[in-house]
Image (spheres, helix red, strand yellow):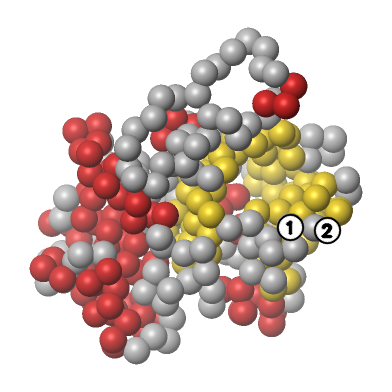
């Protein structure tokens, strides 16, 4: 463990933020904070407009922090060498990839493989891994929402990244396809050693993620561990009990609260 500013950060953390702050539109998306994120499936919840997409894009190195430093997979993203090295190990799926609607599934995954300088065999492997072999010749626009997401995941993971970032991946799968969404959680858990997932509420994350954070007013707050028993079998669990006064050891841990 490494202690920074009073916070303990695991030496094997996938993401390490040192006084990192994110601003957009004249407001703090994330106030300067010190924290580390290790492996597993990590959820980030918050209502639309709170800044989840900006946070994820910063972790993906597509945006630079306003202040502080960001280390991803052991690489300092503040210099060009570290930035390139980190990006080779990251897979990022934005919430909207409608620009690819008219691409065939095989071409979509192939384009991602070409961009990541992967051999042709990687495309075939990704199609098989995400059960897309029969849909490879179809346009993404013709697929049901769950299959489109599988295609997005295949393109995101064609280079077998160590860190995968998913911006509200299940948002397009409606209540009528709830069973399909549940079937995708075991898939999400196997994408990479570390997977970050965003959602508008904690309800879609609790019981499925190893850690869950909420983002509000520029601060990350981690939910207590008790109600977060991760589901690895795709079964449903009850939502966490919300009491007026939680026991001291179960109170949410705020990151960067004193900044």
Q: Nearer the viewer, residue 223 or 50?
A: 223
60 over 230 or under it: above or below? below
Q: Earlier in the sequence, mark 1 or mark 2?
A: 2
- Label 2: state its secondary structure: strand
Q: Is residue 217 visible?
A: no
The residue most toward the top is: 244
Task: Answer left or right for 72 relative to 68.
Answer: left
The numbered disc on residue 204 is none
Residue at 53% over, 45% down: 210
The residue most toward the bottom is: 119
Q: Is residue 85 visible?
A: yes
Q: Position of residue 82 (x, y in %)?
A: 69, 77
Q: Quote the CA–CA distance across marks 1 and 2.
A: 6 Å
Q: Quadrant of residue 254?
A: top right
Q: Quadrant of residue 17?
A: bottom right
* Residue under numbered circle 2: 2
Residue at 86% over, 54% down: 3
- Label 1: state its secondary structure: loop
Q: Position of residue 156 (x, y in %)?
A: 39, 67
Q: Residues within 10 Å of mark 2 (few under 14, many from 20)?
A: few
159 over 51 or under it: above or below? below
* Residue under numbered circle 1: 10
Q: Position of residue 204 (x, y in %)?
A: 41, 35
> Is the C-beta separation of discs 1 and 2 under 8 Å?
yes
Task: Answer left or right for 174 relative to 12.
Answer: left
Quarter of the image with the C terminus is: top right
Q: Quadrant of residue 1?
A: bottom right
Residue at 67% over, 26% down: 250
88 over 129 or under it: above or below? below
């Amino acid at each position: 463990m490494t202690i920074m500013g009073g916070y303990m950060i695991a030496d094997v953390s996938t993401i390490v933020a040192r006084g990192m702050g994110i601003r957009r539109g004249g407001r703090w998306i994330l106030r300067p904070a010190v924290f580390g994120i290790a492996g597993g499936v990590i959820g980030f919840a918050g209502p639309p407009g709170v800044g989840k997409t900006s946070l994820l894009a910063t972790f993906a190195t597509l945006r630079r922090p306003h202040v502080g430093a960001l280390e991803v997979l052991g690489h300092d993203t503040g210099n060009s060498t570290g930035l390139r090295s980190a990006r080779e190990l990251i897979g990022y799926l934005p919430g909207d990839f409608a620009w690819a609607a008219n691409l065939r599934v095989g071409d979509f995954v192939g384009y991602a493989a070409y961009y990541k300088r992967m051999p042709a065999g990687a495309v075939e492997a990704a199609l098989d891994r995400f059960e897309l072999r029969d849909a490879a010749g179809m346009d993404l626009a013709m697929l049901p929402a769950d299959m489109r997401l599988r295609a997005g995941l295949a393109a995101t993971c064609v280079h077998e990244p160590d860190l995968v970032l998913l911006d509200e991946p299940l948002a397009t799968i409606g209540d009528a396809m709830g069973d399909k969404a549940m079937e995708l959680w075991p898939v999400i858990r196997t994408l990479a050693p570390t997977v970050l997932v965003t959602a508008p509420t904690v309800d879609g994350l609790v019981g499925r993620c190893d850690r869950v954070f909420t983002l509000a007013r520029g601060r990350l707050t981690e939910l207590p561990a008790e109600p977060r028993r991760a589901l690895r079998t795709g079964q449903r669990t009850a939502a966490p009990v919300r009491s007026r006064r939680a026991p001291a050891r179960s109170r949410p841990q705020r990151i960067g609260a004193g900044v």
